[in-house]
Amino acid sequence: MVEQQGNAGGERDERDVRRRGVPDDVAHAWDELVATARRTVADGLVVGTSGNVSVRVGDTVLVTPTGVPYDRLTPADVTGVDLSGRQVLGTLRPTSELPMHLAIHGTTDARAVVHTHAVHATAVSTLVDELPLIHYMSAALGGPVRVAPYATYGTPELAENMLRALTGRSGCLLQNHGTITYGSTLSEAYDRTAQLEWMCRVWLTASSVPGRTPHLLTPAQLTKAATHLRDYGQPS
């Protein structure tokens, strides 16, 4: 028993050493970012190292590093940039989609961003310019979800297309690519991604029934739903 306790203490000491010089709030945010990135894989929203996650702590944006499987990330792999994109934490190269993340962090009140290659959402992005109003949860993203025109991944052009699609919204589809959502927390950004993927799946399922056309909500119905959603959940 004594030997086991010593090993456990050694593991804790090693963890502390790897985090030396990293503020507690950054270390905590990194842990949460890694957990969120792993969740995107577990929930089938990304495959391999596709997709990426970021969270802002002060003027530092923590991001998943490019090309590294999420299950291999450790406390020592904390990767962060400033709002101009200059790397200020870690040695691993940041995600190739850094321009999209910085565009959102620099122009909105976002504290967290989640980008995925979710199957149903990506399929919908190839079919329409806007997700049809199949469900009132569109209101939770600010209104009808737009599709940003295609551009090569990791480019300023894609970031610009995305920002236009996000006007007045907290999420959008990226044509022939995937989804991106943001929120005040990683949990909120992730939940919005999951809701968007679910709505896309519902629309694809309903619209695939031969001889039937899905009933869609009207703008007035969506506006009414948005009003109700403001009072959803427990008081702050």
Image: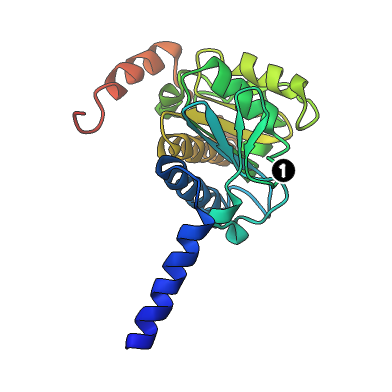
Residue 69 location in percent, x, y?
Answer: 66, 56
In the image, residue 3 above or below residue 68? below
Near-viewer residue (32 or 16):
16
- Residue in the picture at 51% in, 26% down: 59
Q: Which residue is mark 1?
A: 93
Please state, as top left, top right, bottom left or bottom right, where the N terminus lies in the image: bottom left
Q: Is residue 29 visible?
A: yes
Which residue occupies the extreme right position in the image?
Answer: 152
Residue at (77, 32) in percent of width and height: 153
Q: Position of residue 188 (x, y in %)?
A: 41, 35
Q: Is residue 15 above or below residue 30?
A: below
Type of amino acid under label 1: Arg
Residue at screen point 44% across, 39% down: 191
* Quarter residue 147 falls in: top right
One can see residue 203 in this view: no
The quadrant where residue 160 appears:
top right
Q: Front-most of 80 and 153?
A: 80
Image quarter for residue 101? top right
- Viewed as shown, does residue 187 lie left or right of 119? left
Image coordinates of residue 5 in percent, x first then y, are 35, 80
Q: How is the image coloured?
A: rainbow
What crowding class fits label 1: few (fewer than 14 Cα within 10 Å), some (14-19), or many (20 or more)? some
Query: Looking at the image, which residue is at 66% across and 36% down?
Result: 178
- Determine whether 189 is above or below 223 in the image: below
